[in-house]
Amino acid sequence: MRLLRTHTALLLRRILLLYVVLALGRAIFYIANRELIGPLPAAEWWQLICGSLKFDTVSILYANAIYILLALVPLHLREKAWWQNIMFWYYVVANALLAVALNIADAIYFRYTQKRFTADEIFFADNDNSLQLAVRFAAENWPLVLAGAALIALLAWGYRRRTRPEVLFAGAWYYMTGTVILLVATALTIGGIRGGFTKMTRPITLSNATLYTSDNARATLILSNPFCVLRTAGSSSAIRYEHYFDEAQLDAIYSPVHRPAYHPQATAGDSMVLAVRDTTGLAADTTAVAAGSMRGRNVVIFIMESFSAEHSALLRPELYADKAQKGYTPFLDSLMRNGYTFRRMYANGKRSIQALPAVWSSIPSFKTPFVLMPQSLAPTYSLPAILADEGYRTLFFCGSDRGSMGFGAYANAAGIEESYSREDYEKEHGRGDFDGYWGIWDEEFMQYMGEVLDRTQQPFFASMFTLSSHHPFVIPDRYKGRFPEGLTKNHPCVAYVDNAFRLFCERFQDKPWFRNTIFVFVADHVSSEKFSEAFLHSPSDYHIFGFMYAPDSRLHGEYDSVASQIDIMPTLLGLLGYDRPYFAFGRDLFNEPTDTPAAVNYDNNIYQAITDDYLVRFDEERVRDVYAEDDIRLERNLAGQVASEPVERYLKALIQSYYTHVENKNYIVNDTLSRGSDR
């Protein structure tokens, strides 16, 4: 029938094929990640289908706008064989890459970050080992690769390349009808990309997925690429945010400007001190955590790859009550018992690159990792820079290649004066300790770090980013069978890194610099490998290691309220007795208590505040969800049933303050400009 072979009919059939391919890709995504996403309640199926179709529509239109134009432009060139060849190859190649390859890659990537692939990952995936890792991922997930190849073959076969388009009208009617169809298609394309046609409709964003399900994991299932990539491309430079309060109100509720209480210019409105409550779980010996109690000490911060609280029987004893193996971090647990432990430490993000600004600079990442935003290039006055101005040597250690992962660049911007990488290690110790993927094994690189600190003048600030507890989850051959097999692929690696810390401390614990150091242990994010139900959902999927250990000191105790990575810098400055104004989005946990302690992150396109009692989700307009701490599956939404106004007010103020400072590229307190303007 000629009508079914017209340009318009063929276009519609080929677009319908894309819906089928994306639906199959989503099924593959779910099968690959069903343990993380969980079951799909039958009552939500229709809503999930509607949401999926909406995002698939946007993905198809984003990826095929040029193809639609080629198919509908009212010119007889469309009937030429060369024009048809261009259309075929554009359709197959563009959709093979954007609709198939990205979605298949997403099925693998999601296991490690619990977020969909966006433009940020494209700009971030520039490491020397990216190709090697991609080949490794493909080999480990060959069934997914085969499934992707089958979908691409379906695209090529279903296109019906040899079908010759039929023309129903001739002469002027050809151009008139063709123009009308093109205009209608243009209007439908614009409406499809925006998500509607009314003036009130905002262009659809990633957060719209939560309109179709209250569960964030299922919301990620609704999303599809290329929408996630193309919708976020260029968003790093576009700062859009709500202005909830005027300037005076905002500063009264929240300000990242800290003026320590013992600073002569300190006022209540300048700091984050809202009110003191006696439920923080501070150590009985409060002099141990008083401002200045660690004055003059060296500072060493270990940022530990993928160290979930789930690994520790001390932090999460309930997970090991019925298990013979009591956790996988016996040495770190012993340090926690002899140090100061933040039992409810939460990450501010799920990616390593988000951890560095959070820990060193007390700057969180929300919609876009801070270091990937052009505004991050503005001067900051981070913890290393502050301590450098106080006479500290500042060093950074990471066993990967120099410049890998963008760590070295941010270290330099944060005030690190000396960086040590794989190349530096191999100059002194040869090339035999490369793990084959990421860098030098953690045990050897920790020993090297100790050797460098041994010859470093005190006081110093040093930080190390560990590597070995990361995919592809391998340990040195000499340790095969030495550590517990564990419940996840990462547990032997975690036990290996724990042992590396033990060996580091055994070798250097009697050194004068070691006895004069405050050590901070904090994870970058939770592990991709989980064994408990709780860690499949928020807030536990942000629950990480966080503690301090200071030999020959009274710094002992536990902090039972919530804390997060951005609190580390202010807390350390308090312990060191730093008395000048500084900029930080976190708070000094010991000297700036608040009546609304919360750890904040941006999870699957919605803001989350983790409080002592609740998980509160905020969509920039209203509190959408409130879940009790013990509701690990997030089954009972208490929004409207419990008072969430103080948390909502805090979130609004934090978000507005954050984006105001990002927009203005302002991360320095005026009082410190003379000291930090060159940073």
Image: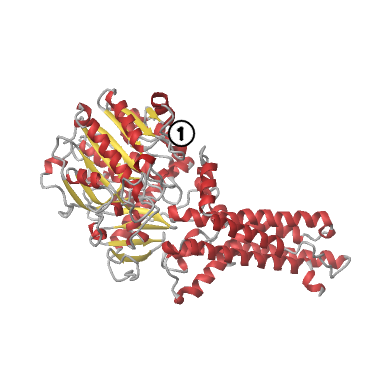
Per the image, the residue denoted by label 1 is 401
**What amino acid type should be assigned to the residue bearing mark 1?**
Asp
The colour scheme used to paint the residues is secondary structure
Other-residue count near label 1 (Cα within 10 Å), few / some / many at <14 / 14–19 / ≥20: some
Estimate the x, y position of residue 114 in percent, counting from the top left: 43, 56
Residue 599, given in percent of the width and then of the height, sits at 31, 53
Q: Quadrant of the C terminus?
A: top left
Image quarter of residue 661 = top left
Residue at the extreme bottom: 43
Image quadrant assignment for residue 266 = top left
> Of residues 653 and 153, which is closer to you in this image?
153
Q: Residue at x 66, y 54 (%)?
A: 94
The one nearer the camera, 197 or 515, is 515
Image location of residue 452, percent across then percent down:
32, 26
Instruction: Please provide percent x and percent y for residue 390.
Output: 27, 27
Residue 469 visible in the picture: yes
What residue is at 31 percent from the left and 70 percent from the top? Answer: 638
- Front residue of this view, candidates 224 and 528: 528
Q: Residue furthest right?
A: 171
Q: In the figure, is residue 197 to the left or right of 416? A: right
